Amino acid sequence: MAGREKRRATALDDDERRGRRRQEEAALLLHKIKGLVGWVVAEVAAGRSPSVALHRYQNYCASASTSAAASPSTCACSYDAPVCTEILSLLRKEFHASRLNVLLRVLLVVQQLLQENKHCSKRDIYYMYPSIFVEQAVVDRAINDICVLLKCSRHNVNVVCSCGKRVRIFSEFLVMGWIRFMEGEKKVYCITNVNAAFSIPVSIEAIKDIVSVARYILVVEKETVFQRLANDKFCERNRCIVITGRGYPDIPTRRFLRYLVEQLRLPAYCLVDSDPYGFDILATYKFGSMQLAYDANVLRVPEIRWLGVFTSDFEEYCLPDCCLLHLSSEDRRKLEGILTRCYLHREAPEWRSELEAMLEKGVKFEIEALSANSISFLSQEYIPQKIKQGRHI
């Protein structure tokens, strides 16, 4: 009993510390917002044109199309430092004045969210001033600019994602396996039914009391593959955690994966289609996306390993020709663009070689093509053997 009471007291202390930290972060952001808005008002009142400096970050460039490919050290891309600065000024262009107007309006919405400790979606913000914002992309860019200005992440400003017309208050992306944790006051005990799907938490700040006896984490590109593994009781037989972002992962999925890798110190493997889009999803997990390059260091999982499927798997596992698809002209353009990214030359030359083989052979195939051997080939042979034999890159 004494041990249980001690653990409960420790959990309460942890909750209090998290609460205080969130309050301190919100107070700091509110102080920055008040200072910025006050300065803009003062400049305009004095007849001066306020100029706002926005640092621009770049986690990759097309180095292979320049001399930088021969000398990667000349590449300016960084996960930590900005590569340039954009100046928005009321005097320069009408376009700049419009962007400043949007930025300040969104900033005031963020201020209200922080003051009231509420959350809203990007879509909610758009509909507050649709005639001014014109399109959703304008709001998205303003939110990214605000995060750069305030030197914070999107979750710090209480703006959540939206899927189409639905607000991401509850996650639509999935986890199963040998793990349990609390999400606020909600118990997420995957470990009691390791083959059942649970929603990924929208906010990792709400996670506490995480426990796992898993040996590794497997990220799969598609929900269909996730369901195949669930039906085959893959987690039960292999003592692991499986996650899917249902295609391109959103911010909560990427943050959750990074959190698991850091907290549980487990290896992470990724299984995607053998096509340019599958690889781009894999690269988003490992290197981050260009749109959120300013936040790549808290979103990317540099330790993640590419488990498959590879172009060479088609011949190795004797798949029938009907499973192969020819790369379309759009596929080729995308693949050629990916091959120029500097991080493939600097950090992942083996990945680049695999992509070059795909382009040379001009073919692609899906994970599900492995089912041509048997319906459970993926879960019973392909994945376990690859991990056991270390056949990943």
Image: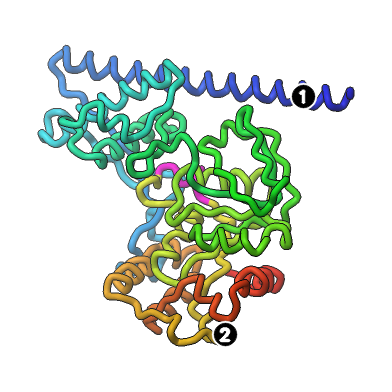
Residue 382 position within the rendered picture, expressed as x and y whole percent measured from the top left: 63, 73
Q: Do we see residue 297 in this rendering?
A: no
Label for residue 276? Answer: none
> Seen in the image, is 277 located left or right of residue 385?
left
Instruction: Look at mark 2 in the image and give the residue it sits on.
Output: 316
Q: Is residue 225 above or below residue 83?
A: below
The residue that appears at 17% across and 12% down in the rendered structure is: 45
Residue 316 seen in render: yes
| Residue on which disc 1 sits | 8
Q: Residue at x 39, y 56 (%)?
A: 60
- In-image side of 376 versus 154 (left or right): right
The N terminus: image quadrant:
top right
Q: Are marks 1 and 2 in contact (CB under 8 Å)?
A: no
Q: Earlier in the sequence, mark 1 or mark 2?
A: 1
Real-space Cα separation, disc 1 to disc 2, in angstroms: 53 Å
Under mark 2, the amino acid is Glu
Helix, strand or loop at mark 2: helix
Q: Position of residue 154 (x, y in %)?
A: 42, 35
Quadrant that contains the C terminus: bottom right
Q: Which sits in the foreground, 207 or 58?
A: 207
- Residue 35 pos. (x, y %): 34, 17
Q: Nearer the viewer, residue 141 or 208?
A: 208
Per the image, label 1 sits on a secondary structure element best described as: helix
Vertical position of residue 370 compared to residue 251: above or below: below
For image coordinates 40% across by 67% down, the residue present is 71
Q: Badge 2: few (under 14), some or many (20 or more) residues near its Cα, within 10 Å?
A: few
- Residue 264: image location, x then y, percent: 69, 47
Magenta segment main secondary structure: helix
Magenta highlight on residue 154: no
Which residues are the magenta region? 294-300
Q: Amino acid at mark 1?
A: Arg
